[in-house]
Amino acid sequence: EKRAQEILVATIQRLATETTSDITVATVSLPSDEMKGRIIGREGRNIRALETLTGVDIIIDDTPEAVVISCFDPVRKEIAREALGRLITDGRIHPARIEEIVQKVTREIQQKIYEEGEKVLFDLGIHNMSQEGVRAIGRLYYRTSYGQSVLVHSREVAEIASMIAAEIGANRELAKRAALLHDIGKGAETDTDQNHAEVGAEMARKMGEDPRIVNAIAAHHNDCEPQTLEAVIVQIADAISAARPGARRETVDNYIKRLENLEETAKKFIGVEQAYAIQAGRELRILVNNEKIPDEQVKDLAKRIAKQIETDLQYPGRIKITMIRETRIIEYAR
């Protein structure tokens, strides 16, 4: 037991990592306060277009030369931050340009996800990862667990596992690779009812990873028996990273889950294209398909969604439901 304590203390002392992450807000600097009026637009049409397209809250107050973007979803927040920054630089701020920039940034985010995966693999010295594996790791950049970035956590676990393996003479490269991949199931875009360890193990299997790595991923929450020493090292490293003071905030995770449940409840209804929980969950903004839902049915749909939320969810106060149905007709003069 004394030797085990020495190994853990030596490992923790060697690791230096960030302890905080900016979770729900991002700040965009403005060249001058006059820009605030242009972002808002005539009768608020610009800010309304940006909020509707990205699903974020844009807070414009007395803060000098700054606009705050608030959203629990890191991907949506990043798209809004990048799009707003480009619009400010470009100077042309109107609904059509906003839509064009948001679509462009959304496409570029996918490339950034891949680059983040490559960067972490390069920093850790891990090679021969499939393209799908690189993407799966990169997706963790925009995922949080209890307020802790999953990619930061996975990288930290990989470094801890590598150090522990070196201390006790286990396979260092295997432990590091398994530790980095242990939470890839959290970034999976899937509707399965399996937990993230099972999803991650299945992903690793399809990516052609070593069966020992697949087992380490599946076993990291004791859902199955760890079959190797490296799998046990991954469990230990995961526990150390999660337990570190300041690494996680449970209240944030509960808050995010509540907002996600709110959005998912609305998305279950036929005709709902997108749902965004804003104002810390006090408002639900719903975009409906104009071909499936005619104008006269929108109010009835809003009532049914409200009833479902009342039945399924627990929440403080009341939730305002805003329905948006847009009819867009395009014709060309030749």
Image: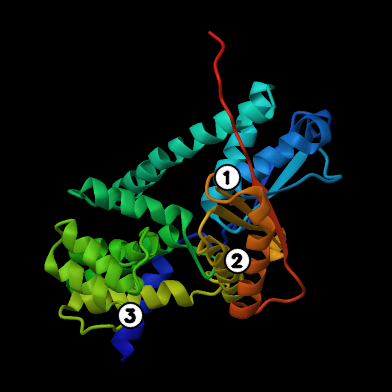
Q: Nearer the viewer, mark 2 or mark 3?
A: 2
Q: How much space separates mark 2 and mark 3, taking CA atoms?
A: 26 Å
Could you say which is closer to the camera, residue 115 or residue 84? 84
The image quarter containing residue 211 is bottom left
Residues at discs 1 and 3 in contact (Cβ within 8 Å): no
Residue identifier under label 2: 259
Q: Earlier in the sequence, mark 2 or mark 3?
A: 3
In this view of the protein, can residue 209 be seen by the observer?
yes
In this view of the protein, can residue 167 be seen by the observer?
no
Q: Nearer the viewer, mark 1 or mark 3?
A: 1
Residue 226: x percent and y percent? 20, 81
Residue 292: x percent and y percent? 53, 50
> Label 3: few (<14), some or many (≥20) within 10 Å?
some
Q: Earlier in the sequence, mark 1 or mark 3?
A: 3
Q: Nearer the viewer, mark 1 or mark 2?
A: 1
Residue identifier under label 1: 290
Q: Amino acid at mark 1?
A: Asn
Residue for point 72% across, 67% down: 319
Residue identifier under label 3: 221
Residue for point 56% across, 35% down: 102
> Label 2: few (<14), some or many (≥20) within 10 Å?
many
Tell me: 113 left or right of 288: left
